[in-house]
Image (tube, grey):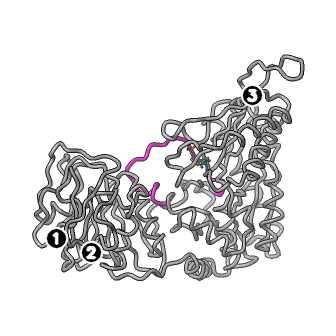
Amino acid sequence: MDRIDAVTAPTAPVTTAHRPVLVVDYGAQYAQLIARRVREAYVYSEIVPHTFSTEQLLAKNPAAIILSGGPSSVYAEGAPAVGADLFAAGVPVFGICYGFQAMARALGGTVAQTGLREYGATDATALAGASSILEGTPELQNVWMSHGDSVQEAPEGFEVLACTAGAPVAAFADPARKLYGVQWHPEVKHSDFGQTVLENFLFREAGLEPDWTTGNVIDEQVERVRAQIGTGRAICGLSGGVDSAVAAALVQKAIGDQLTCVFVNHGLLREGEAEQVERDFVAATGARLYVANEQERFLSALAGVTDPETKRKIIGREFIRAFEAAEAAIVAEAADAGEPVRFLVQGTLYPDVVESGGGEGAANIKSHHNVGGLPEDLQFELVEPLRSLFKDEVRSVGAQLGLPAEIVGRQPFPGPGLGIRIIGAVDEERLALLRKADAIARAELTASGLDSEVWQMPVVLLADVRSVGVQGDGRTYGHPIVLRPVSSEDAMTADWSRLPYDLLARISNRITNEVDGVNRVVLDVTSKPPGTIEWE
Ligand code: XMP
């Protein structure tokens, strides 16, 4: 996933004409998932921090508000509270898990620490006659729970809709005030009727229309980009990945040849990647493309470096230098030579915006280098047409803009490329070896029809490890290749993909037979956490 970098102001607003459903983030990872589920119902949603005052929330003119789950107990010291004034504003509000308890507490209900915790799959029973947000769901339903405290008594005016063994009030509604809540997590797929409950809130109770589509996004963003750039000139770094390609295609649609795309070939690409950008992207968009062949620059800077963070920093630094050189060349070549490029297009996505703007101190696990990203002193004004979108929405925008399936459907590939998939120093020989193994693994995965089952499948060369093997009649002492297929929704967490054994066998046979210097293929069976997706 492309990451936000230092030049993007984290607080810049996400812009769209639709009134948002605001998801108030009480921590944990649920808020993003809730926002996605709302958008899957074709309703526009945005995440805001729980530190927003009622005034700030209402200033966004929300169509409805959802209070998310969170890790806190409403009794914990410093636990975020909800101002009771929010519930008197006439905006429909739906509390989930922590948000449900915070709502109950703010309105005079009782929340208790009973010691009866519920985690994971739980049976919820609807009370006789309950409908509202439970309309169309069965009396007994499987819901996903994660709570210690529970609501014992609903506030005055609320009807209790459901209970579980550990939660006498597991769902409630006050249709007169348009206030609703559930103890469980409807946004999690393990809650069998989760999406129905969420859509009941949006459509039945809050009266919203499902009218937000990625088609609207294209029209809206094309207008905005035109207004922002006017007659100016823009450049866009292409990484070969989905995000930068879609951002570039959208801006190209808006301003045509005022945009030049820059593709830095750093020599750490996979087989066929440079050709794909040069041929397929240009064919689909007609965009002007400047290719900077900078393999030598990167390889000499990386020579002998084994530390992962040092590699990432070097690649980031050299990328900036290569990009600056490219920009200078573009300006010199242009008909109106001397007119500087004022705008830089970046494929920043919504999760990047949320992660960097959340300000809750997400740990810096790795310094993610966004290949489209550049330092502050280049003084570009940023153009970020995708900053309100999730990855799957970006793919859908890309497809509507006519980008080929090979680009739109691509697995995420990190900016530092194969440089961080060689464990040990990077050199041309090792890159060639890994490129070959990677191409085989990708081809076999595609041939098996399982591309859509995996989020991505890094192929890693353990260049500093050797093991003994036997091939033909002789002893070998070669390197292992690691296959790291993972399934994930957003790369924040991941699980290892259970690929069929016969597919793994084919990949292993082909790699050990066809790639000189590799005599062993191993499978990484670690989830994230504890392992990250990439090895470096
Ligand atoms: P990790 O290894 O942190 O990766 O679990 C999460 C996702 O991010 C991708 N990734 C990167 N993407 N620049 C990028 O644009 C980077 O430096 C980078 N490092 C990791 C990784 O492939 C996975 O999808």
State the residue position of label 2: 132
- Residue drawn at (61%, 35%) of the image: 524
Q: Main secondary structure of the magenta part?
A: loop
User: Are the residues flagged by discs 2 and 3 in contact, CB closer than 8 Å?
Assistant: no
First in residue order: circle 1 vs circle 2? 2
> What kind of residue is marked 2?
Ser
Is 155 displayed left or right of 16 in the figure? Answer: left
Report crowding for label 1: few under 14, some 14 to 19, many 20 or more residues within 10 A (C-alpha): some
State the residue position of label 3: 520
Residue 372, x across and y down, in percent: 65, 57
- Residue drawn at (18%, 80%) of the image: 176
Residue 451 falls in image quadrant = bottom right
Give the number of marks. 3
- Residue drawn at (63%, 59%) of the image: 378
User: Are the residues flagged by discs 1 and 2 in contact, CB closer than 8 Å?
Assistant: yes
- Secondary element type, mark 3: strand
